[in-house]
Image (cartoon, helix red, strand yellow):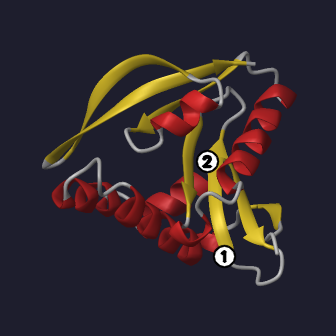
Amino acid sequence: MQKRFNLQPGAIADLPRMQQTFEASVRQMCNRDYTEAQLDAWIGRATPSRWEELLTGDLQFLLAEEEATKALAGFTSINTQGYLHSMFVHPDYQRQGVATLLLNAAEAFARKHDAPSVHSEVSLTAQPFFTAKGYHIIKEQTVNIHPESLQNAVMEKQL
């Protein structure tokens, strides 16, 4: 039986399960492309105060919950200018259409706000997904997260 997912806006009360989803996604899905030290640095940046700052800023957070269990399958965040800040899918929900559902909703949000494109800093792990969805690499870059450096790419899709 195929699982069904519902989208809802993110709220401060969702922070603990968003953090858990983020950490599980980064640790279990990105470990082929980044070292343990790089993953630790990436995860270490996501403090509770940083999450709260993001949730109360200009980003719209969208959460995908499994309909039957209400478990958080994944989440994304985007602003009205089309900057896709985050997209993380829990490892238990990979390859079930969650990222596509979230990306489609984020793109619809950007269109609604007349953004000409959606752009994001995309991990090495997620680049094939974004390429398959019509995104193109604008530039490859190295991001410094003390004391580590991580490779990613700025990717964009015209709407």
- Which of the marked residues, 1 or 2, is nearer the chain's N terminus? 1
* x then y, percent, for residue 30: 36, 54
Which three-letter amino acid code belongs to the residue tagged 2? Answer: Gly
* Quarter that holds the N terminus: bottom right
Q: Is 143 placed left or right of 100 in the picture?
A: left
* x then y, percent, for residue 13: 66, 76
Q: Which residue is mark 1?
A: 13
Q: Is 109 placed left or right of 58 in the picture?
A: right
- Neighbours of disc 2 within 10 Å: few (<14), some (14-19), many (20+): few
Q: Nearer the viewer, residue 36 or 119?
A: 36
- Neighbours of disc 1 within 10 Å: few (<14), some (14-19), many (20+): few
Residue name at image x 71 percent, y 49 percent: 102
| Quarter holding residue 140 | top left
Which three-letter amino acid code belongs to the residue tagged 1? Answer: Ala
Disc 1 vs disc 2: Cβ atoms closer than 8 Å?
no
* x then y, percent, for residue 114: 81, 21
| Quarter holding residue 115 | top right
Inspect this view and state whether residue 150 appears: yes
Mark 1 or 2, closer to the camera: 1
Residue name at image x 30 percent, y 62 percent: 44
Q: CA distance from mark 1 to mark 2?
A: 15 Å
Q: Is residue 132 above or below residue 8?
A: above
Residue name at image x 41 percent, y 59 percent: 29
Q: Which residue is mark 2?
A: 57
* x then y, percent, for residue 20: 49, 74
